Image: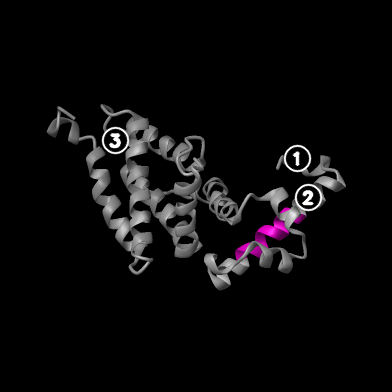
Amino acid sequence: MKTYPEQSKTSRQLQAERTKHNIYMTARKLIADKGFDNVTIEEVCRTAGISKGLFYHYYKSKDDIIIEGYSECDDYFETHVRNSLSKENFLDRIVEFIDYQILYADKLGIDVLIQAYKSQIQHGNDFFVSEGRSLPVILKEIIDRGKEKGDIRIDLSTDYITNFILRFSRGLLYDWCLHDGNYDIKESAHEAVKRLVELFRIEQISKNPSN
């Protein structure tokens, strides 16, 4: 749905946004309370006080609710994370950054994350791998600054390092889903990413010239 500056919105546009928000919040609460598979679109519509036709005007399926919830991650990174990163060494800052990614997923909850991955696989939505998202954009900025400072090796492209790290972090989250969230993802991921970023330390160029 197209958004407009607040002061230029018509009453119809404002009502549309309120309706969509009502559907979204109703569905999210029901899913949080009962689990994704135990909530039907009919129940969402009944609880929200809308028709099924109105639901399908805004969302194609329950999966779209999950993806929209996860897409709020980008707003979170823009408004809360971008200016909160404080580690002086930029390899440490990458770890700090991925810590935020894992923390966000943990707060969403394992059920939401599992459904988000299912939706990506079943319906082919390219949200997770879109290069225009705040997640890869901010990570690229960190890597570029780390190269300028001399913390991060320059023989590998920023795109390569960014994709390498995000594939790794998505893999960590996927493994957490496979284990139904039965271990501490924050602690496990933090240790794993600390080990991973050592591959990109500037000294590695001389140790591994063929890389």
Observer-side mark, 1 or 2, equals 2
The residue sitting at 27% across, 51% down in the picture is: 194
Q: Residue furthest bottom?
A: 33
Choose the circle earlier in sequence order: 1 or 3.
1
Q: Secondary structure at mark 2?
A: helix
Rendering quarter of residue 42? bottom right
Q: Which residue is mark 2?
A: 16
Asked if the residues shown at circle 2 and circle 3 are in contact, with their CB atoms under 8 angstroms apart, the answer is: no
The dominant secondary structure in magenta is helix
Q: Amino acid at mark 3?
A: Ile
The residue sitting at 77% across, 61% down in the picture is: 50
Question: Can you see residue 88?
Answer: no
Observer-side mark, 2 or 3, equals 2
From the image, which quarter does the C terminus lie in?
A: top left
Question: Would you say 47 lies left or right of 28 here?
Answer: right
Q: Which residue is mark 3?
A: 152
> Total of numbered circles in the picture?
3
Coordinates of residue 119 in the picture (x, y in percent): 49, 51
Q: Residue furthest right?
A: 11
The residue lying toward the viewer, choosing from 202 and 130, is 130
Question: Would you say 39 lies left or right of 117 here?
Answer: right
Q: CA distance from mark 1 to mark 2?
A: 12 Å
Question: Would you say 199 lies left or right of 8 here?
Answer: left
The residue lying toward the viewer, choosing from 40 and 5, is 40
Q: Which residue is mark 1?
A: 4
Q: Secondary structure at mark 3?
A: loop
User: What residue span does the magenta drawing correspond to?
Assistant: 19-28
Choose the circle earlier in sequence order: 2 or 3.
2
